[in-house]
Amino acid sequence: LLRIVALSAAINVVSNLVLVPIYAATGAAISLLLTQGFVFVAALFCARPYLKADFEPLNTLLKPILSGLVMGGGLFLVQRWNIFLVIPLGTLIYFFFLFAVQAFDADERRLLRDAARKLARV
């Protein structure tokens, strides 16, 4: 855990030194995102032996990240649209792509299907 903290501090300092002079507040935000992303992934891998659930890095990390990138790209194309259209569109793109890359297991798909049926009755 100490190694994760030390390495994340180094990542944060270096990325701030590189990004903040060029991009100002946006650079600081990107630096923070990189650092926190590293801490999350490293802590997840360190906690892996203690987790009771199966941990599959592909489903747990890569597929949602990829879906988020696709959603971000789609929303970038329609960024000038009304926010009340963009938010539902982003949600649809994200979940559609999660289904397309099969990020949900059978239990999760059943849970989502049951929730959709309950919402349809309302």
Image: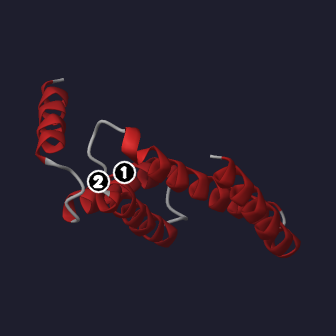
Q: What secondary structure is found at the residue carrying circle 1?
A: helix
Label ID, residue 95: 2
Q: Is residue 105 left or right of residue 60?
A: left
Which coloring applies here? secondary structure
Disc 1 vs disc 2: Cβ atoms closer than 8 Å? yes
The label nearer to you, 1 versus 2, is 2
Q: Amino acid type of disc 1?
A: Thr
Q: Could you tell me which residue is drawn at 82 percent across and 75 percent down?
A: 18
Instruction: Tell me if residue 118 comes above or below residue 36 in the rendering.
Output: above
For residue 79, say whether it is visible.
yes
Residue placed farthest to the top in the image?
122
Q: Residue 119: which numbered mark, if any?
A: none
Q: Give the x, y percent position of residue 112.
A: 18, 39
Dividing the picture into quadrants, the one containing residue 58 is bottom left
Tell me the SS state at disc 2: helix
Q: Whole-percent x and y of residue 93?
A: 33, 60
Any part of residue 26 in sight: no
Give the class, few, some or many, for how many residues have Cα within 10 Å of label 2's Cα (few <14, many ≥20): some
Asked if residue 80 is positioned above or below residue 95 in the image, the reply reads below
Which residue, given by chain and number where applicable, does mark 1 sit on? Answer: 91
Up-down relation of residue 86 to residue 119 (above or below): below
How far from the left and from the top, in percent, is residue 35?
A: 67, 58
